Amino acid sequence: TATPTETPAPQIVAGTAPGFPPFEIKEDGELTGFDVELFEAIVAETEYEFGGWREFEFDALIPALRDERIDAIAAAMTITDERDQVIDFSDPYYSADQSVIVLEGGDFVPESLDDLSGRMVGVQEGTTGEGVVDTQLIEEGKLQESNKRVYGNYTLAVQDLENGNIDAIVLDQPVGATFADQRDVTVAFVYETGERYGFGVRQNDSARQQAINDGLAAVRDNGTYEELRNEWFGS
Ligand code: ARG
Protein backbone atom coordinates (compact mmCIF):
# COMPACT_ATOMS: atom_id res chain seq x y z
CA THR A 1 0.00 0.00 0.00
CA ALA A 2 1.15 3.50 -0.80
CA THR A 3 2.42 5.76 1.93
CA PRO A 4 0.78 9.21 2.02
CA THR A 5 3.92 10.81 0.64
CA GLU A 6 3.84 8.71 -2.54
CA THR A 7 1.90 10.02 -5.50
CA PRO A 8 -0.20 7.28 -7.10
CA ALA A 9 0.82 6.11 -10.56
CA PRO A 10 -0.95 8.10 -13.26
CA GLN A 11 -3.71 6.18 -14.97
CA ILE A 12 -4.96 5.33 -18.39
CA VAL A 13 -8.72 4.80 -18.45
CA ALA A 14 -9.61 3.31 -21.82
CA GLY A 15 -12.77 3.66 -23.87
CA THR A 16 -14.10 1.27 -26.47
CA ALA A 17 -17.25 0.43 -28.44
CA PRO A 18 -18.04 -3.30 -28.30
CA GLY A 19 -19.95 -5.17 -31.00
CA PHE A 20 -17.03 -5.03 -33.42
CA PRO A 21 -15.60 -8.56 -33.56
CA PRO A 22 -12.86 -9.59 -33.17
CA PHE A 23 -11.56 -6.19 -32.02
CA GLU A 24 -13.96 -5.53 -29.15
CA ILE A 25 -16.70 -7.91 -28.12
CA LYS A 26 -18.91 -8.50 -25.12
CA GLU A 27 -18.97 -12.22 -24.24
CA ASP A 28 -21.11 -13.34 -21.30
CA GLY A 29 -20.90 -9.80 -19.96
CA GLU A 30 -17.10 -9.76 -20.30
CA LEU A 31 -15.30 -7.31 -22.52
CA THR A 32 -12.63 -8.95 -24.67
CA GLY A 33 -11.15 -8.94 -28.16
CA PHE A 34 -7.93 -8.13 -29.96
CA ASP A 35 -7.93 -4.41 -29.07
CA VAL A 36 -8.84 -5.12 -25.47
CA GLU A 37 -6.05 -7.63 -24.89
CA LEU A 38 -3.54 -5.70 -26.95
CA PHE A 39 -4.20 -2.39 -25.24
CA GLU A 40 -3.97 -3.90 -21.75
CA ALA A 41 -0.67 -5.54 -22.72
CA ILE A 42 0.61 -2.20 -24.01
CA VAL A 43 -0.33 -0.30 -20.85
CA ALA A 44 1.34 -3.02 -18.75
CA GLU A 45 4.61 -2.05 -20.47
CA THR A 46 4.26 1.58 -19.39
CA GLU A 47 4.56 3.55 -16.16
CA TYR A 48 0.81 4.06 -16.22
CA GLU A 49 -1.67 2.08 -14.22
CA PHE A 50 -4.52 0.62 -16.25
CA GLY A 51 -7.67 2.38 -15.02
CA GLY A 52 -10.21 0.03 -16.61
CA TRP A 53 -12.61 0.11 -19.56
CA ARG A 54 -15.56 2.38 -20.24
CA GLU A 55 -18.01 1.47 -23.00
CA PHE A 56 -19.60 3.93 -25.41
CA GLU A 57 -21.23 3.98 -28.78
CA PHE A 58 -18.49 4.57 -31.32
CA ASP A 59 -19.43 8.16 -32.14
CA ALA A 60 -19.36 9.08 -28.42
CA LEU A 61 -15.72 8.05 -27.92
CA ILE A 62 -14.04 11.23 -29.15
CA PRO A 63 -16.26 13.52 -27.05
CA ALA A 64 -15.60 11.28 -24.00
CA LEU A 65 -11.86 11.51 -24.58
CA ARG A 66 -11.96 15.27 -24.96
CA ASP A 67 -14.09 15.62 -21.78
CA GLU A 68 -11.53 13.53 -19.86
CA ARG A 69 -14.01 10.76 -19.06
CA ILE A 70 -11.43 8.46 -20.66
CA ASP A 71 -7.72 8.87 -21.41
CA ALA A 72 -7.43 6.71 -24.51
CA ILE A 73 -9.55 5.12 -27.23
CA ALA A 74 -8.97 1.50 -28.27
CA ALA A 75 -11.78 0.86 -30.74
CA ALA A 76 -10.36 -0.12 -34.13
CA MET A 77 -10.44 3.60 -34.85
CA THR A 78 -9.09 4.59 -38.23
CA ILE A 79 -6.60 7.44 -38.23
CA THR A 80 -8.28 10.11 -40.38
CA ASP A 81 -7.41 13.77 -41.02
CA GLU A 82 -10.76 14.85 -39.63
CA ARG A 83 -10.23 13.02 -36.34
CA ASP A 84 -6.63 14.13 -36.20
CA GLN A 85 -7.88 17.73 -35.94
CA VAL A 86 -9.52 17.02 -32.59
CA ILE A 87 -7.52 14.19 -30.99
CA ASP A 88 -4.07 12.66 -31.38
CA PHE A 89 -3.26 9.10 -32.39
CA SER A 90 -0.64 6.53 -31.51
CA ASP A 91 1.41 4.85 -34.20
CA PRO A 92 -0.77 2.60 -36.38
CA TYR A 93 -1.33 -0.93 -35.05
CA TYR A 94 -3.56 -2.56 -37.70
CA SER A 95 -4.50 -2.09 -41.38
CA ALA A 96 -7.93 -2.57 -42.89
CA ASP A 97 -10.12 -1.94 -45.92
CA GLN A 98 -13.89 -1.75 -46.09
CA SER A 99 -16.12 -4.63 -47.15
CA VAL A 100 -19.72 -5.11 -48.13
CA ILE A 101 -21.60 -7.97 -46.52
CA VAL A 102 -24.94 -9.43 -47.60
CA LEU A 103 -27.18 -12.32 -46.60
CA GLU A 104 -25.51 -15.68 -47.19
CA GLY A 105 -27.16 -17.60 -50.01
CA GLY A 106 -29.42 -14.65 -50.84
CA ASP A 107 -30.37 -13.28 -54.26
CA PHE A 108 -28.50 -10.04 -53.84
CA VAL A 109 -24.82 -10.45 -54.74
CA PRO A 110 -23.30 -7.01 -55.37
CA GLU A 111 -19.86 -6.78 -56.96
CA SER A 112 -19.20 -3.07 -56.58
CA LEU A 113 -20.49 -0.05 -54.66
CA ASP A 114 -22.57 0.92 -57.72
CA ASP A 115 -24.58 -2.27 -57.26
CA LEU A 116 -25.84 -0.86 -53.95
CA SER A 117 -27.86 1.79 -55.81
CA GLY A 118 -31.44 1.87 -54.63
CA ARG A 119 -30.83 -0.74 -51.92
CA MET A 120 -31.10 -0.41 -48.14
CA VAL A 121 -27.58 -0.11 -46.77
CA GLY A 122 -26.62 -0.31 -43.09
CA VAL A 123 -23.67 1.37 -41.36
CA GLN A 124 -22.54 2.17 -37.85
CA GLU A 125 -22.88 5.84 -36.98
CA GLY A 126 -19.72 7.90 -37.25
CA THR A 127 -17.57 5.21 -38.86
CA THR A 128 -15.48 5.28 -41.99
CA GLY A 129 -18.00 2.78 -43.39
CA GLU A 130 -20.64 5.47 -43.07
CA GLY A 131 -18.17 7.83 -44.74
CA VAL A 132 -17.89 5.53 -47.76
CA VAL A 133 -21.68 5.40 -48.11
CA ASP A 134 -21.92 9.19 -47.79
CA THR A 135 -19.13 10.14 -50.17
CA GLN A 136 -19.22 7.31 -52.71
CA LEU A 137 -22.96 6.72 -52.91
CA ILE A 138 -25.15 9.49 -51.48
CA GLU A 139 -23.06 12.46 -52.64
CA GLU A 140 -22.71 10.76 -56.03
CA GLY A 141 -26.48 10.56 -56.32
CA LYS A 142 -26.45 6.75 -56.35
CA LEU A 143 -28.26 6.29 -53.06
CA GLN A 144 -30.96 8.29 -51.30
CA GLU A 145 -30.24 9.44 -47.76
CA SER A 146 -33.36 7.46 -46.76
CA ASN A 147 -31.73 4.28 -48.10
CA LYS A 148 -28.98 4.55 -45.52
CA ARG A 149 -29.80 2.97 -42.18
CA VAL A 150 -27.58 4.08 -39.33
CA TYR A 151 -27.02 1.84 -36.29
CA GLY A 152 -25.46 2.36 -32.88
CA ASN A 153 -23.39 -0.76 -33.50
CA TYR A 154 -22.79 -3.29 -36.26
CA THR A 155 -24.24 -6.22 -34.32
CA LEU A 156 -27.68 -4.60 -34.64
CA ALA A 157 -27.07 -4.02 -38.34
CA VAL A 158 -26.22 -7.70 -38.87
CA GLN A 159 -29.46 -8.69 -37.13
CA ASP A 160 -31.38 -6.47 -39.52
CA LEU A 161 -29.54 -7.98 -42.48
CA GLU A 162 -30.39 -11.50 -41.32
CA ASN A 163 -34.02 -10.45 -40.87
CA GLY A 164 -34.17 -9.05 -44.38
CA ASN A 165 -34.73 -5.45 -43.27
CA ILE A 166 -31.67 -4.20 -45.13
CA ASP A 167 -29.79 -5.47 -48.20
CA ALA A 168 -26.15 -4.84 -47.33
CA ILE A 169 -23.75 -3.47 -44.70
CA VAL A 170 -20.56 -1.51 -45.27
CA LEU A 171 -17.97 -2.17 -42.57
CA ASP A 172 -14.30 -2.82 -41.93
CA GLN A 173 -13.16 -5.93 -43.81
CA PRO A 174 -11.74 -7.90 -40.82
CA VAL A 175 -15.06 -7.41 -39.04
CA GLY A 176 -17.08 -8.34 -42.11
CA ALA A 177 -15.03 -11.54 -42.37
CA THR A 178 -15.65 -12.33 -38.70
CA PHE A 179 -19.42 -11.82 -39.02
CA ALA A 180 -19.28 -14.06 -42.11
CA ASP A 181 -17.78 -16.81 -39.93
CA GLN A 182 -20.27 -16.39 -37.11
CA ARG A 183 -23.54 -15.33 -38.72
CA ASP A 184 -25.73 -15.96 -41.79
CA VAL A 185 -23.88 -13.36 -43.85
CA THR A 186 -21.11 -13.36 -46.43
CA VAL A 187 -18.55 -10.86 -47.72
CA ALA A 188 -19.72 -9.82 -51.20
CA PHE A 189 -16.63 -7.76 -52.02
CA VAL A 190 -13.85 -5.67 -50.52
CA TYR A 191 -13.59 -1.93 -51.16
CA GLU A 192 -10.00 -0.82 -50.74
CA THR A 193 -9.50 2.16 -48.45
CA GLY A 194 -6.07 1.44 -46.94
CA GLU A 195 -7.12 2.45 -43.43
CA ARG A 196 -4.86 2.22 -40.42
CA TYR A 197 -6.05 1.94 -36.85
CA GLY A 198 -4.51 3.98 -34.05
CA PHE A 199 -5.18 4.41 -30.34
CA GLY A 200 -6.64 7.82 -29.63
CA VAL A 201 -5.27 10.15 -26.96
CA ARG A 202 -6.13 13.71 -26.02
CA GLN A 203 -4.47 16.45 -28.00
CA ASN A 204 -1.23 17.54 -26.36
CA ASP A 205 -1.18 14.49 -24.06
CA SER A 206 2.20 13.64 -25.51
CA ALA A 207 3.14 11.76 -22.32
CA ARG A 208 0.44 9.11 -22.82
CA GLN A 209 0.93 9.14 -26.59
CA GLN A 210 4.64 8.42 -26.16
CA ALA A 211 4.02 5.78 -23.49
CA ILE A 212 1.51 3.97 -25.74
CA ASN A 213 3.89 4.12 -28.71
CA ASP A 214 6.72 2.72 -26.60
CA GLY A 215 4.40 0.04 -25.21
CA LEU A 216 3.28 -0.89 -28.72
CA ALA A 217 6.90 -1.21 -29.84
CA ALA A 218 7.61 -3.36 -26.78
CA VAL A 219 4.74 -5.80 -27.41
CA ARG A 220 5.79 -6.06 -31.05
CA ASP A 221 9.36 -6.87 -29.94
CA ASN A 222 8.45 -9.38 -27.25
CA GLY A 223 6.06 -11.40 -29.45
CA THR A 224 2.86 -10.49 -27.61
CA TYR A 225 1.47 -8.61 -30.61
CA GLU A 226 1.93 -11.61 -32.89
CA GLU A 227 0.51 -13.99 -30.30
CA LEU A 228 -2.64 -11.88 -29.98
CA ARG A 229 -2.93 -11.57 -33.74
CA ASN A 230 -2.78 -15.34 -34.10
CA GLU A 231 -5.27 -15.78 -31.28
CA TRP A 232 -7.86 -13.39 -32.73
CA PHE A 233 -7.26 -13.66 -36.48
CA GLY A 234 -5.63 -17.05 -36.80
CA SER A 235 -2.87 -15.70 -39.03
N1 ARG B 1 -12.45 1.66 -38.40
C1 ARG B 1 -13.73 2.28 -38.50
C2 ARG B 1 -13.64 3.73 -38.09
O1 ARG B 1 -12.69 4.12 -37.51
C3 ARG B 1 -14.79 1.57 -37.67
C4 ARG B 1 -14.48 1.46 -36.22
C5 ARG B 1 -15.66 0.96 -35.40
N2 ARG B 1 -15.20 0.54 -34.11
C6 ARG B 1 -15.96 0.02 -33.15
N3 ARG B 1 -15.40 -0.35 -32.05
N4 ARG B 1 -17.24 -0.12 -33.32
O2 ARG B 1 -14.52 4.51 -38.33
Image (cartoon, helix red, strand yellow):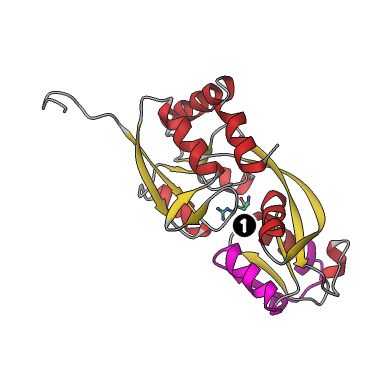
Q: Quadrant of residue 115?
A: bottom right
User: Which residue is outermost to the left?
Assistant: 4
x and y percent of residue 51 in the render?
Answer: 33, 40
Between residues 173 and 112, which one lies in front from this camera angle?
Answer: 173
Where's residue 225, x and y in %?
Answer: 58, 30
Q: Residue, x 36% and y 47% (percent of image)? A: 68
In this rendering, is residue 94 above or below 59?
Answer: above
Q: Amino acid at mark 1?
A: Thr
Residue 102, position as x, y percentages in the image:
77, 67
User: Residue 159 in magenta?
Assistant: yes
Range of residues picked out in magenta? 136-165
Rendered view: 222 above or below 82? above
Residue 139 shows in the view:
no
Q: Secondary structure at mark 1?
A: loop
Q: Quadrant of the C terminus?
A: top right
Is residue 111 a member of the stretch shown in magenta? no
Tell me the quadrant of the picture where the N terminus can be found: top left
Measuring 55% from the left and 58% from the top, which residue is drawn there?
Answer: 19
Q: Is residue 44 left or right of residue 191?
A: left
Residue 52, above or below 30? above
Q: In this orientation, does residue 91 appear?
A: yes
Q: How packed is label 1: few (under 14 Cα within 10 Å), some, or many (20 or more)?
A: some
Q: How many marks?
A: 1
Residue 47 occupies quadrant? top left
Residue at position x 73%, y 59% in the image = 132
Tell me if the residue at label 1 has its CB under 8 Å from ligand 1. yes
Q: Nearer the viewer, residue 35 or 119?
A: 35
**Residue to which mark 1 is pinned:** 127
Give the image quarter of residue 105: bottom right
Which residue occupies 60% across, 53% down? 21
Q: Does residue 148 sit above or below 80 in this rendering?
A: below
Residue 148 is situated, as x and y percent measured from the top left of the image, at: 69, 73
